Image: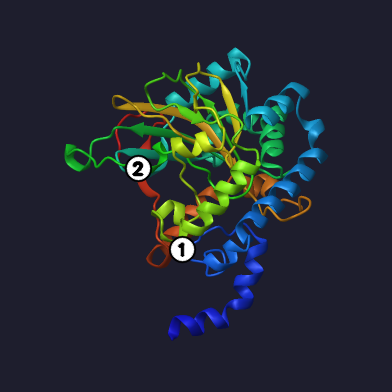
Amino acid sequence: MTGLLRTILLFPWWTATLATGAKSFADHPLIGSRRLNEAGLHVARVRAAQALARRRRAAMSAQVRPDDRAAFDRDGFVVRRNFLPAPMFARLRDGLEAWRGPARDMRQGDAVTRRFALDPAILAAVPELRALLRHPEWQGLIRYVSSFDAEPVCYVQTILARCAGAEGAPAPRGDPQLRLHADAFQPSAKAWLFLDDVPEDEGPLTYVPGSHRPTAERLAWEKRMSLAARGAERLTARGSFRVSEEDLFEMRLPPARRFAVPANTLVVADTFGFHARGPSVRPSRRTEIWAYSRRNPFLPFALPDPGGLAAIRERRVTAYWKGRDVLARWIGQPWRPAGARSPFDMEPS
């Protein structure tokens, strides 16, 4: 009775949030409603989000090169080798290798994702970072792929694969990022500027070319998933659908491509497309400048973005972490302080 009363009282709120990026089938009674999804609610949200993204991208098409637009339309990602001039990239990497600062770790199975906020301290120590963040092609590609003319959130990120557990004990397997998945029902962007060569067998980024397109086969799969998601494994239930090889075959999609690429390669991808972290056959480290951009998919145009102001841009990640620390009792905090680290350290916290 208490749950029913709560749903009734919050019904106007639940209804309003259908016009946002809310995606959890487990926590939202309308998004997770089998009856509404049988009637097409989830597929309608996917269709609308895609249509509005196409409109916003068309308005930003001048920000990217024609060959990059063509590659994105075909594959769902853009790859740019030797993205930065070699002397600038060398200074960027050397500066980060010499730098140590506060990090946060998140463990998933036997993998650790470590992030460093691009705050005033690191930007002063490694000025090439600030130059990268202002690079017109870095900004243009992320904004175009995300479909929003908004400041992306950026970090220095280290992926530690096949880590030992506490005190050297083996960590549990089951890194959920090894399974191909879509981040959400809407177009969004992630970017990786790799600071080291990425071997084929040490956890490369993988992506299914063309899986960003809302084809008839993809929409049929989205509908099937929407009917089963509420009772599925945790990440699918929260709206990040996992996909099997059989599903890819039914959607007429090719196998995933592994980005075994040299250092100074930039990849920008729409994470509505299916992607994952490739397996690593040994303990390994992947270090990169990483960015993401995801906004309310139902806005017909980009609103003014205060995140572009330096005073906000350079402090918002730290503020986010500290805010979650305060609220951890109620909403959890997966990002644990890891002390002063180098982005090229191999040791988990």
Labelled disc at residue 331: none
| Residue at (56% x, 64% y) in the render | 31
The residue identified by callout 1 is 26
Residue 123 drawn at (x, y percent): 56, 35
Residue 188 drawn at (x, y percent): 62, 43
Mark 1 surroundings within 10 Å by alpha-carbon count, few (fewer than 14), some (14 through 19), many (20 or more):
many
Residue 131 drawn at (x, y percent): 65, 28
Q: Is residue 157 above or below residue 151?
A: above
Helix, strand or loop at label 1? It is loop
Q: Nearer the viewer, residue 278 or 135?
A: 278
Q: Amino acid at mark 1?
A: Ala
Q: Are marks 2 and 1 in contact (CB under 8 Å)?
A: no
Point out the frontmost of discs 2 and 1: 1
Determine whether, in the image, residue 106 is placed left or right of residue 290. Answer: left
User: For the C terminus, which image quadrant?
Assistant: top left
Residue 283: quarter of image: top left
Q: Amino acid at mark 2?
A: Gly
Q: Is residue 33 visible?
A: no
Q: Is residue 330 above or below residue 300?
A: below
Q: Is residue 41 visible?
A: yes
Residue 45 drawn at (x, y percent): 66, 56
Residue 167: quarter of image: top left
Helix, strand or loop at label 2? It is strand
| Residue at (56% x, 68% y) in the render | 35
User: For the N terminus, which image quadrant?
Assistant: bottom left
The residue identified by callout 2 is 339
Determine whether, in the image, residue 103 is placed left or right of residue 125. Answer: left
Q: CA distance from mark 2 to mark 1?
A: 34 Å
Mark 2 surroundings within 10 Å by alpha-carbon count, few (fewer than 14), some (14 through 19), many (20 or more):
few
Q: Is residue 146 above or below residue 9?
A: above
